[in-house]
Amino acid sequence: VEQSYIMIKPDGVQRGLCSKDLAQEHYKDLKDKPFFPTLINYITSGPVVCMAWEGVGVVASARKLIGATNPLQAEPGTIRGDLAVQTGRNVVHGSDSPDNGKREIALWFKEGELCEWESVQTPWLIE
Ligand code: GTP
Ligand code: MG
């Protein structure tokens, strides 16, 4: 089987390849907030890694794992609590509701880009 090593080179990281339109649509609920322009600049300042997670209670459990919006209030052991310092640089995003999960996945992925996969362990995890 072929292998390919893919690397985003320094110019790719620096050039802000996530479009402003997509970022504005993604965070449209916050468009009237004073920090909206800085949020859009932040989120379009370099490439992001997109993931679509699926599972029982995944919205709430992912948010728990991510921690509070302000990293100074995020618990130790959460991603923001361990790795971030400021709200405006809080490392990771997670949808805040199942409806927004669907909406955001549809925004960031084209049909056919998502892969459905079930582990043989699933029946031992989920009754
Ligand atoms: P996301 O998972 O990114 O949606 O964060 P959240 O759901 O914990 O917070 P919210 O949706 O309210 O805000 C979205 C993002 O806007 C936050 O993650 C921050 O990056 C940014 N943000 C929110 N409040 C502030 C603020 O007061 N100042 C600044 N600079 N950024 C903020
Ligand atoms: Mg949010």
Image: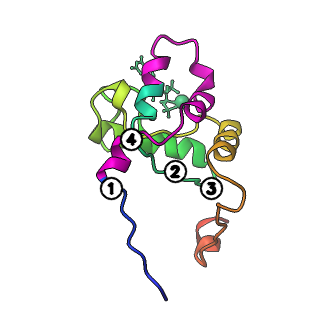
The secondary structure making up most of the magenta span is: helix
Which range of residues does the magenta coloring cover?
10-39
Image coordinates of residue 93 in percent, x first then y, are 48, 39
Disc 3 marks which amino acid? Glu
The image quadrant in which ligand 2 is located = top right
Q: State the image quarter where residue 42 is shown.
A: top left
Residue found at x 62% / y 71%: 122
Q: CA distance from mark 1 to mark 2?
A: 18 Å
Image coordinates of residue 112 in percent, x first then y, are 70, 62
Give the residue number, with chain letter if any, for mark 3: 54
Name the element at disc 4.
loop
Disc 4 marks which amino acid? Arg
- Residue 92 in view here: yes
Mark 1–mark 4 contact, CB under 8 Å? no
Please determine whether, in this image, residue 34 is positioned above or below residue 43.
above
Indicate yes or no whether the magenta region holds residue 121: no
Name the element at disc 2.
loop
Q: In the picture provided, is 45 more to the left or to the right than 53?
A: left
Image coordinates of residue 94 in percent, x first then y, are 52, 40
Disc 1 marks which amino acid? Lys
Which colour scheme appears in the figure? rainbow
Residue found at x 59% / y 49%: 58
In depth, the one of 67 and 102 nearer the eye is 102
Give the residue number, with chain letter if any, for mark 2: 50
Q: In the picture provided, is 27 more to the left or to the right than 90?
A: right
Residue found at x 41% / y 36%: 67
The verdict on label 2 being within 8 Å of ligand 1 is no
